[in-house]
Amino acid sequence: MTDIQITCYSTKMKKRFTPIISFIAFAYFTVTFSGCAFGLQPLPDTVQQQLNDAADQGMDGIIVCVNRADDIKLYAAGWKNRESQIPADPYTLFKIASISKLYIAAATTRLVANEKLSLDKTLAEYLPEVTGRIEFADQITLKMMLQHRSGILDYSSEPEAMGETFDDYLSFAARVYDKPAAFEPNKKYRYSNTNYLLIGAILDQTLGYSHHTYIRDELLIPLGLSDTYNTQAEVNMEELMSGYLIGWEADVKDWEYPLPGGSMIATAEDVSVFLRALIDGTLLSPEEQAIYTSVYPYEHTGWLPGYTSIARYHPDIDAVVVQFINTSGKEIYWLELKRLYKT
């Protein structure tokens, strides 16, 4: 069995969203593993046995979907809710966190193809109010934000700002205002959630309505994805898998994350269907496909307190594989989750 030693420090929780930012920005975890790690054991004969072994070693609940062109298989182990001893259900809803960025990138691609947006237009042109508040706003293009090459700081690593709200993306982006950029535009790659927060604001402004509605109408409904939601507010909470954060005993599924690029909730099967359609041309036209390929990859991982996820295509076996685990920690533990996926 795996022994886990936790040291955790966090700021006092003041409102619904604060716990998430506290753990992202201020939590410190020390995770010590003894005995056999997942990748050091003999490989089980089946996917189900691998999941069962992982659950036995301390992961609360696991869901895996393997989507081949002519077949979809679902697996589950552990708990959907450990307090009530409700078994993991492969059809349950899950917070997919940053996998949401695939949907925003696809929506942006379609608007670019329809000439509603331009990849070469700058952040300052789209959102003049950030000029002088975000360094190089007049040089950072939409394409750079999509590619995480903008140099804009990641708000999840910055302290909470005064006046921060859930329904005003730019107010929330104030965390990074008036601070030096991480680097000059297009000089490097550095993942930043702020890029997709700002893209969400750009989409809303361009459309004249919420980009959530656009994603639903343009991407989800045509694919029949009735188990995919833009925000937690849309979800029947009884259908949402519980989430568990190492060092925090209680279920954290009530903690909300309503910001663009991390807010979506879906089943593993729906995510697999979306990713396959994104890749094989079912969802995008050839023109849109070319644009998408130039700005974003066809895979993603996701992390929120209590929720870790991986969605990836494997061309050698023509399969999309989606893995959900409702246990999250930091550093070494995340490496263990990736190792489980590879095995």
Image (tube, rainbow, N blue to C red):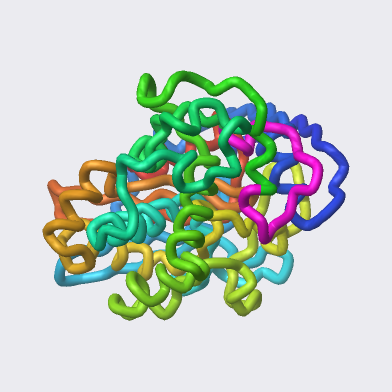
Q: Quadrant of the N terminus?
A: top right
On screen, residue 213 above or below 185: below
Q: Main secondary structure of the magenta part?
A: loop
On screen, residue 333 above or below 55: above
- Residue visible at 80% across and 32% down in the picture: 9
Q: Nearer the viewer, residue 1 or 209?
A: 209
Q: Nearer the viewer, residue 201 or 190?
A: 201
Q: In the displayed structure, does residue 244 sit left or right of residue 319?
A: right
Q: Quadrant of the C terminus?
A: top left
In the rendered image, residue 236 lying in the magenta stretch gets the answer no
On screen, residue 169 above or below 214: above
Relative image position of residue 285 (x, y in whole percent): 16, 64
In the rendered image, residue 162 lying in the magenta stretch gets the answer yes
Q: Is residue 41 visible?
A: no
- Residue visible at 29% across and 76% down in the picture: 223
Q: Which residues are magenta?
A: 154-170
